[in-house]
């Protein structure tokens, strides 16, 4: 009985080992197949990229050639426009020079104006100094001035009164 169980256990182990080996073999085959598929896919992508690179290079060459033709035509048109408007170009150049000269003159006049404004400012400050001195001198005689002003008011009111008296006669 024990020998039967051992025999049975040995057969089960042998069967299990066989199954594990079969699984390993199948996995190795699947891995090899997957590796081969991926290699083929990468090769296919490389081919596509190579052909795309060739196409882009050819297209770039074509575009460069087209651009060169367009640039040549534009240069011809520019030459024709210049030939048709040579007088206007010369006049424009003269006007540009005149404008430049006027800009320089305006700049110089602006500097002169700024100097004159500063001179005026200095003179106004000097004027204020003199006005303060005059005011200080007036303040010296403020008492006398107040007395004279009061006297002038009294005299004026008396004159007014005499004028009123004469008017009634």
Image: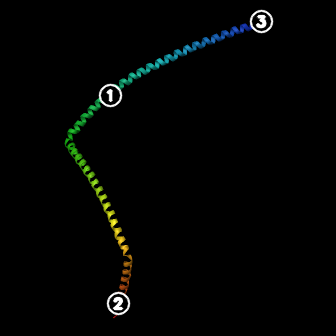
Q: Residue furthest left?
A: 87
Report, in whole angstroms, how far the alpha carbon at label 2 lies from the one at label 3: 168 Å
Horizontal arrangement in the rendering, residue 9 relative to residue 69 (left or right): right
**Quarter of the view holding residue 129:** bottom left
Crowd rating for badge 1 (residues with CA inside 10 Å; few <14, some 14–19, many 20+): few
Earlier along the polypeptide chain: callout 3 or callout 1?
3
Task: Say what secondary structure mark 1 lies in.
Answer: helix
Disc 3 element: helix
Residue shown at 50%/16% (left/top)? 39
Above or below, 119 against 74 in this view is below
- Which one is in front in this view, the residue at disc 2 or the one at disc 3? 2
Q: In which image quadrant can residue 157 be found?
A: bottom left
Q: Earlier in the sequence, mark 1 or mark 2?
A: 1
Query: Which residue is painted at 32% across and 60% down in the image?
Result: 122
User: What is the CA distance from the residue labelled 1 to the residue labelled 2?
Assistant: 113 Å
Depth check: 97 or 155 in front? 155
Q: Label 2: how many residues lie within 10 Å, few (<14), some (14-19) or many (20+)?
A: few
Q: Nearer the viewer, residue 41 or 17?
A: 17
Name the residue beneath numbered marker 1: 64
Residue 31 in the image, given as x and y percentages of width and height? 56, 15
Judging by the rendered image, the residue that carries numbered circle 2 is 162
Kindly indicate whether the residue at mark 1 contacts the one at mark 3 (C-beta within 8 angstroms): no
User: Residue at the location (62% across, 12% down)?
Assistant: 24
User: Label 3 belongs to which residue?
Assistant: 4
Image position of 7 (left or right of 97): right
Q: Is residue 75 left or right of residue 17?
A: left
């Amino acid at each position: 009985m024990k020998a039967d169980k051992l025999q049975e256990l040995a057969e089960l182990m042998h069967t299990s080992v066989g199954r594990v080996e079969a699984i390993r073999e199948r996995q190795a085959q699947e891995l090899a197949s997957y590796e081969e598929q991926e290699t083929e896919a990468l090769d296919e992508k490389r081919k596509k990229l190579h052909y795309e690179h060739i196409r882009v290079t050819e297209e770039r060459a074509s575009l460069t050639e087209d651009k060169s033709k367009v640039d040549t035509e534009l240069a011809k048109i520019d030459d024709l426009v210049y030939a048709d408007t040579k007088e206007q170009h010369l006049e424009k150049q003269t006007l540009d020079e005149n404008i430049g000269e006027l800009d320089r003159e305006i700049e110089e006049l602006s500097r002169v104006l700024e100097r004159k404004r500063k001179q005026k400012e200095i003179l106004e400050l000097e004027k204020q100094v003199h006005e303060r001195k005059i005011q200080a001198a007036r303040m010296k005689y403020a008492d006398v001035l107040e007395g004279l002003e009061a006297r002038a008011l009294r005299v004026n009111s008396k004159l007014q009164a005499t004028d009123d008296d004469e008017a009634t006669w």
